[in-house]
Image (cartoon, rainbow, N blue to C red):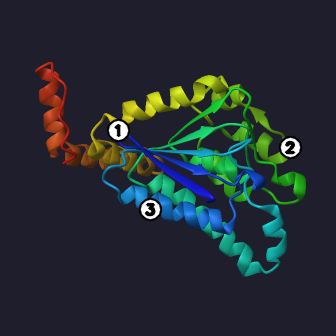
Amino acid sequence: MNLKVKNLPGGISVITINEPKTYNSLSFKNLTDLIRVFKELNNDKKTKVIIIEGAGKGFSAGHNLKEVRNLRIKNKYQKLFNLCSKLMLQIVEGKKPVIAKVHGAAYAAGCQLVASCDLAYSTNDTLFATPGVNIGLFCSTPMVAVSRKINRKPMMKMLLTGEPIKANYAKEIGLINDCFAKSKLNYEVMKIAKKIASKSNLTIKIGKQAFYKQLEMPLRQAYAYTSKMMTLNMMAMDAKEGISAFLEKRKPKWKNK
C-alpha cells in the first residue's frame, strides 16, 4: 500500500505516504491516491482533523524524477503538474483542517505540500528546500504555496540557490508552526489535533474557507466578505450554543449545525 489511512478516536485521521523507497515521492499514482483520500475524508462526517506524514526516512522529496524523466511529452508534464496543483488546492479549499507532520526532509513539491497544509510541525533536524534550480527545473509550482506562507526575500533565496533551510529557520520565517525533538513530535501534533477536533466542525469549516478567501481580497472587500461570513456563522446553532455555554460557565455541546 502506497498510502495508509488511520482513523483515530476523536475524529482525527492520519494519512501516511508509505513509499519510503522513493522518499514518498509525489508520483502520478501517489497524487491521484492522495486526491481521492482527501476527498473521502473531507466528506466523512466523523473526520474533524487530518494529519499527513511520510513513512521511512523523511516526509517527501517531491516529484519522482525517474518518472518525470520518462514522461518526455509536453502534455504528460502538464498533466502531472496540474494533478499536483489539484491536490494542493483541494487541501486549501477543503472543509477540514490539515496538519503536516514532517521529519527528515520536505523538498520541492514535498515542501509545497507542507506549505499547503493549514498547520505544520516538524522534528528539529528536518530540512526544507525548493531545489529545482539545481537540476535545471525552477520550482515554479512549489513557490505558489511557499510564497504565500513566507516573505519574498527568504523565498527568493530558497528558489535561486536551491539550498535547504533548517527547521528552526523554517519556523522563524513562518513555513512551519514549530519544531520539536523526534520523541516529542507525535505527542505535540496529536495535542494540537485534539484541541482543534474539540471545536465545532461547522465553525472550523466556515472559518477555514473565510481565512483563505479574504487573504486574496483588497481590505474593504475582505471586511465586507468576512462580515457576511460572521453573520452566517452567528445564525448557526453552534454559535448560539457556544455563547450560551460561555455565559453560563459550562462546556458547549456542539451539534455541528
Count neighbours of disc 3 (C-alpha within 10 A) and say few if under 14, some if 14 to 19, many if 20 or more.
Answer: some
User: What amino acid type is highlighted by mark number 1?
Assistant: Gly
| Labelled pair 3, 2 in contact (Cβ < 8 Å) | no
Left-right relation of 60 to 212:
right
Is there a contact, CB below 8 Å, between mark 1 and mark 3? no
Near mark 2 (Cα within 10 A), the count class, few <14, some 14-19 or many ≥20, is some
Indicate which disc, 2 or 1, sits on the residue closer to the N terminus: 1
Q: Name the residue under label 2.
A: 161
Residue neighbourhood size for the residue with mark 1, other residues' Cα within 10 Å, grouped as few (<14), some (14–19), many (≥20): some
Give the number of the mark in front: 1 or 3: 1
SS at circle 3 = helix
- Residue 141, above or below 181: below
Residue 57 x, y percent position in the rendering: 74, 41
Q: Residue 72, can we see it?
A: yes
Quadrant location, the N terminus = bottom right
- Secondary structure category for the residue under label 2: helix
Could you tell me which residue is drawn at 39 percent across and 32 percent down?
A: 194
At 69% across and 41% down in the image, what residue appears?
152
Q: Of callouts 3 and 2, which one flags the residue occurring earlier in the amino acid sequence? A: 3
Residue 150 image point, x, y percent: 63, 38
Horizontal side of residue 23 vs 91, given as left or right = right
The amino acid type found where label 3 is placed reads Lys
Q: Nearer the viewer, mark 3 or mark 2?
A: 3
Q: Say which amino acid is labelled 2.
A: Thr
Q: How far apart are marks 1 and 3 (CA)?
A: 20 Å
**Residues at marks 2 and 1, CA–CA distance in whole angstroms:** 43 Å
Q: Name the residue under label 1.
A: 10
Seen from the viewer's position, the closer of residues 210 and 187 is 187
Question: Mark 2–mark 1 contact, CB under 8 Å?
Answer: no
Secondary element type, mark 1: loop
In this view of the protein, can residue 178 be seen by the observer? no
